[in-house]
Image (cartoon, rainbow, N blue to C red):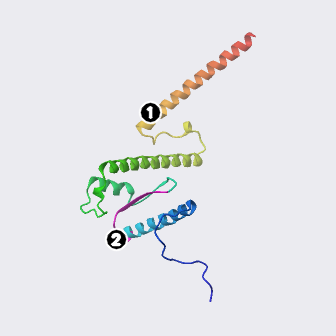
Amino acid sequence: MMKKKTQGRKKIEIKRIADENSRQVTFSKRRTGLFNKASELCVLTGAEAAIITQSPGGRVFAFGHPSVDSVVDKYLAGSSKNIAVNEVNSIPTSMQENFNQKYKEISKEIEDEKKKNVLEEKLEDNPNFWWEESFEHLGIEELEKYIASMEQLKDNITMRVDEMAMLRNSSSLI
């Protein structure tokens, strides 16, 4: 008979973990487990759920089905008739506003990061310069930025040509 290599599952005392590295590892593992359980709950019952948690290191993680935004928007709009979350409404309004503000900031950071990743992927896929790409797919705001960039490029080139001409003229005088 083979001897078990691990201790398996055992009941632990619920208290703060003193060692910082152990605490971070535990957070990561339990976060994954929590998100998996929430996902199972959503799939099995058709429930909509959102979980937002912050690591001991300050990073924010979120899970949502169908998305964090849709669940939070429904909650904030009060469209859910029965909210059974241990008296969520007993949280002071200022704390709710603070949470909402943090959520909006984090959502914006996530969107910015997604846009940045998409741009990086485009650059990897297309080795052309930005001014060589087609601009037919751009919206009005993007076209205005494109025009402003082109005008700035034109001004920079004109200034550089003038500088070069002055240098050439001054060197020919000497």
**How many residues crowd around disc 1 within 10 Å: few (fewer than 14), some, or many (20 or more)?**
few
Residue at the image position 47 percent from the left and 71 percent from the top = 13
The N terminus, quarter of image: bottom right
Furthest residue toward top: 173
* Cα gap from disc 2 to disc 1, whole angstroms: 48 Å
- Residue range corresponding to the magenta coloring: 43-55
Q: Tag 2: residue type? A: Thr
Regarding mark 1 in the picture, which secondary structure is present there?
A: helix
Measured from the top left, where is residue 7 in percent x and y?
56, 78
Residue 123's place in the image compared with 66, above or below, is above
Residue 126 circle label: none
Q: Mark 2 points at which residue?
A: 45
Regarding mark 2 in the picture, which secondary structure is present there?
A: helix
Q: Nearer the viewer, residue 89 or 172?
A: 89
Q: Name the residue under label 1.
A: 144
Residue at the image position 42 percent from the left and 36 percent from the top = 141
